[in-house]
Image: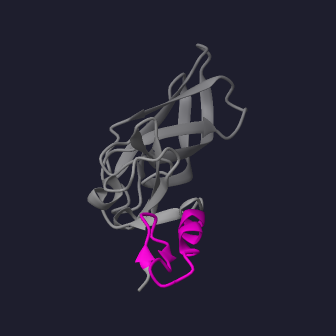
Amino acid sequence: MPTITFNKIRTKIGSDPYALTADDKAEKESMNVVIPVASTAEMEALPETEGLTVTRLDLRGQNFVFVDGGWRSVTPYAQAAGLTSVTFSNAISSNRVTVNLPTGRFSKGPMVVGNIATSQAGDVNLFFVNVTASSFEVGAYRATERVYTGTVPLYWQALQMTADDAAG
């Protein structure tokens, strides 16, 4: 009858009269494998071993590593990225644009970062407001007081690190 180790590797413990299975078990427990778990309770029931990695099947395959006495997410719970643009109309600040996020992907308002995709407008700073699980608004303003007319393309990325928190 096989035995299953804490990291879900099957061993032949109890089936070998020559007692070679203890070495076999030690070998398998030393493997650096990602352990599939179905819940927080199953993850927290594992031995507190630095570097132990699990994949949460209940969280779309999100990976966690046991580090510094606790479980830490190492992959985002949800993420999205895209390209949009804002328009300056003879002004130092642009209009705000609403960006809709993929439906159902985020459970909380994500962290949003962005970058200007052109240098034509000069010194432009971005801001993100009204961030929710379904959308956010992005706008821009020029660092100088010179007015500008034109459309400025910008890349954005939205991240949610855990199911409960954008920063994780």
Q: Give above or below for 117 relative to 29.
A: above
Queried whether the magenta region covers residue 138, the answer comes back as no
The magenta stretch is 3-28
Eyeballing the image, is 8 above or below 78? below
Q: Is residue 15 magenta?
A: yes
Q: What is the image's colouring?
A: one colour
Viewer-proximal residue among 138 and 131: 131
Between residue 24 and residue 87, name the one nearer to us.
24
Q: Position of residue 132 (x, y in %)?
A: 31, 45
Judged left or right of residue 104, residue 19 is right
| Residue 93: percent from left, percent from top | 50, 25
Q: Residue furthest right?
A: 119
Q: Residue at x 52, y 38 (%)?
A: 113
Most extreme residue toward the top is 145
Residue 136 horizontal/vertical position (percent): 38, 44
Residue 55 shows up from this direction: yes
Say which quadrant the C terminus sits in.
top left
Above or below: residue 47 compared with residue 61: above
Quadrant for the N terminus in the image: bottom left
Q: Quadrant of residue 69?
A: top left
Q: Is residue 133 left or right of residue 145?
A: left
Q: Measuring 54% from the left and 44% from the top, which residue is drawn there?
A: 156
Residue 168 seen: no
Instruction: Tell me if 45 is positioned left or right of 18 in this view.
Output: left
Give the quadrant of residue 109: top left
